[in-house]
Every structure is written in C-alpha cells, then in structure tokens.
Image: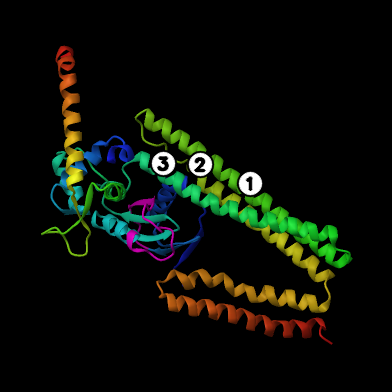
Amino acid sequence: MPRESLQTLTEPMYYVLLALVRPLCGIEIMERVDELSHGRLAIGPGTLYSMLKKFEENGLIAPAMGPDSPPKRKTYAITPRGVGFLKQEYERLKRQAEDGKTIMEELV
Amino acid sequence: MSSDVKKEFLPFYYSDLDAVARHLELMAANGWMLKSFGNTCEYEPCEPLIARFNVVLCPAKDADSPQIKPEAREFIELCEDSGWQFIDHRGPAYAFFTADETIPSIITDEAERIEAVRRAGGRSRLLSIANIGINALQFLLRLTDALTEKDPVSRGLSIALAAFFGIAVILLAVGLITSLMSEKRWVDAANAAISAGKPIPRSDDGVLRRRKAYSVTFIIAIAAATALLIAYAMRTMSPEGRSFLAAMLTAALPLAFIPRLFKKKRSPAAKTFIIIGLVLGYLLLTFILVLIFGAAFGAFQ
C-alpha cells in the first residue's frame, strides 16, 4: 500500500500529486505547484526529482505524453491508484479541518 | 597547463556541501569560476560574479559514475530547466550555479538532505572499510611472512611491508572514524534543528581547512612510509630485485592519469581497448625499464 511506504504525505507531495492530475513535465510541475499554492510553496528541482521517483516506485504516477510538454523532457501523470490515494488524503485533510473547526471558532 | 587555470585541492565530507558552495561563491566573487570538480578543482578566470552555488547529492541511480548516466541526466535537466546551470560532479556531489536570486534551492526538503548525506556517507564508508580490510589482510600476510621467513633479507622486507600496511590501516581507520563522528554530529544537529522548526545549521567556515589539513597529513604520511619502504628495499635487495622494483614503480607513474581516460563517455569497446592497452603498455614499459635499471645497477651479469 502506498501509505505504508510513503507514510504521511507532506504538503509539497500533496501539491505535486494535485498538479499531476494532468500530464506535466518537471518544470511544468514546479510552475503548477506555485500556481495551486498561490506562490506559497516552492519545490526545488532536486526535491521534486526524488518525489517523482518515489511516486513512480509506488505506482502513484507513471510516465505519460503531455500535449504541450517540451520535447525530450520526461512527462508524468497521476495513475488511477494515485487518484485514489489523493482522494483519501483530501478526505483526511478535510476531516482534520472539520474536527478543528469548532475549537478554532471558540479560540477566535 | 594553461596559466589561466587555477587548481585547488578541495577535500570534503558529504555533510560539508553547504561550505563547499559558499567557498565556490567566494571564488566566483574573486573572479574564479569553477570549471571542473574532480579531486582537484579547476577554476578559470571570470568577471567577479555574485552567483549562488548549490552543491547537492544527486539522488539518481549511479550518480557517482564518472560518466553521466540517463537518470542523472534527467536530474540535471530538471535543475537546468528551473534555472540552475550544471558545472561538473565529483562522485555523487553535483555542482550547479545561478545568477538568479529568486529561484528555489535545488533541495528544499531538509529531511531529504539529511537522508541523502547518510546514504552517500554509508556507501563511502563501505568502500573505506573494504580498503581497510584489504590493507589489514596485507599486514597480516606480511607479518606471517616476517615470522616464518628464514632469509634475513626477505624477513626484513616482510617486516618493512608489514609496517607500511600497518601504518596505512591506522591512517585509514582514523579517517573513517573521523568521518563517522563528523557525520553523526551533523545529522544530530540537523535533526534537532528540524524538530525545532529551524533550518539546518550552516557548516562552520573552517571545516574545509580542517579537511584539507587531515588529507594533506594523510598523503604526506603515506608518501613518507612508501619512500622509507622503497629506500629500505633498494638498500637490502639484490641488484636484480632492485631493477624489478624500480622498473615496476616507475612504470606505474603514468597510471595516475587513468581516471582522465574514463571521464569522457566512451563505448564499451573503446573502454576494453583502453584497458588492454594500459595493461600491455605497463608490461612493455616495465620490461624496458628493467633492462635500463638492470644496466644501471649491474644486474643480470
């Protein structure tokens, strides 16, 4: 199971999987993560490389052909298994936010 | 060698890479841009430049191969697409630079950086342990020879060789323990910083000077031990023995240039030819030198 080998998804991992809902190459992934996080998150190319290899080993992403990707650059896209994993993670984060909502409202 | 190239002996541990990057930035600011990143760094003159350098452990498979393999090439291309320019690599340590202040560092995950140092350090230590093992075995073999040999000349040579390998084992072991302790200190400090939500502490500015001091001491000690051994052997051996020893050592000198032959990408057939050529060349050169030294020492009469 991906969760056992990946343990908990870090924030950059989550955003990279979100970005790969459509096929993208490395530099496009970095730009998309920057866009999705509204400039809050910057991933270094070395960190992204390690992440992509880990995701690929765990079957969450696979090499793909992107329509607009630069030539000679490896493109990745999320797999159905990766989509399932992403949805689980999204639900977990939603539950966490909801669980804390009452407490946070009291603090305000 | 062009007079416009500056060479520098720059030893470091994998936990020192931020210090190496800072050193390269200082060199660039003083008008020297890194050109090659082997055991000896080479710099070429440039306009003084405020540049950022990143020296990182490449996570790709076979990253420490002298030739850039496809996975490492993918890693380099990813870095270059994001604005970092690749210069060269030494083992798994890859050097990049950029003049752009805004682009993110190559490694932005501190935990990954620690893990990369531990992995690379572990592989390097396995090689060191193998090296120590080989030298220790040689020490034991020579010691056994010394204890069993009846001929005083041969016994003396065996003792000298045993002493040489013994010194090598001690020096290598000290180096291994030092690197292990240094890495553990760095990893502990780095983990503590991450747990406290802080960035990994910078290596201190003196760390590269210390590494150089140890490496130079090691080289001098080994060179001195080798010189003493050779001198002792030459003094006690027969003229024929001296001729062979002198010929073998002299013929081995060009072997120091072997790594340069394999740095360029070559086909397997080319590499095979080079290796065969080197072996045959060494044997031929040794034969010729035996004759020359034999004549000089009055051997084979």
Whole-percent x, y for residue B229 in the image: 76, 63
Please report the bounds of the magenta region as a residue range. B46-71
Above or below, B98 against B231 in this view is above
Going from N to C along the chain, the mark reached first, 3 or 2, is 3
For the point 31% across and 36% down, the residue is A7
Residue beneath disc 3? B114
Give neighbour class at mark 2: few <14, some 14-19, many 20+ (Cα, 10 Å): many
Left or right side of B53 for B14: right
Whole-percent x, y for residue B207 in the image: 51, 44
Numbered-mark total: 3
For the point 73% across and 64% down, the residue is B227
Going from N to C along the chain, the mark reached first, 2 or 1, is 1
Whole-percent x, y for residue B25 in the image: 38, 52
Left or right side of B276 for A62: left
Left or right side of B294 for B287: left
Magenta stretch prevailing secondary structure: loop
What SS does tag 3 mark? Answer: helix
Residues tagged 3 and 1 counted as in contact (Cβ below 8 A):
no
Q: What residue type is labelled 2?
A: Glu
Q: Which amino acid does label 1 sit on?
A: Val
Residue B174, numbered label: 1
Camera sees residue B3: no
Judge whether residue B52 is colored magenta. yes
Q: Which amino acid does label 3 sit on?
A: Ile
Give neighbour class at mark 3: few <14, some 14-19, many 20+ (Cα, 10 Å): some
Tell which subunit mark 1 falls on.
Answer: B
Residue beneath disc 2? B183
Outermost residue on the left side: it is A67
Outermost residue on the top side: it is A106
Instruction: Name the residue nearer the viewer: A83 or A14.
Output: A83
Camera sees residue B185: yes
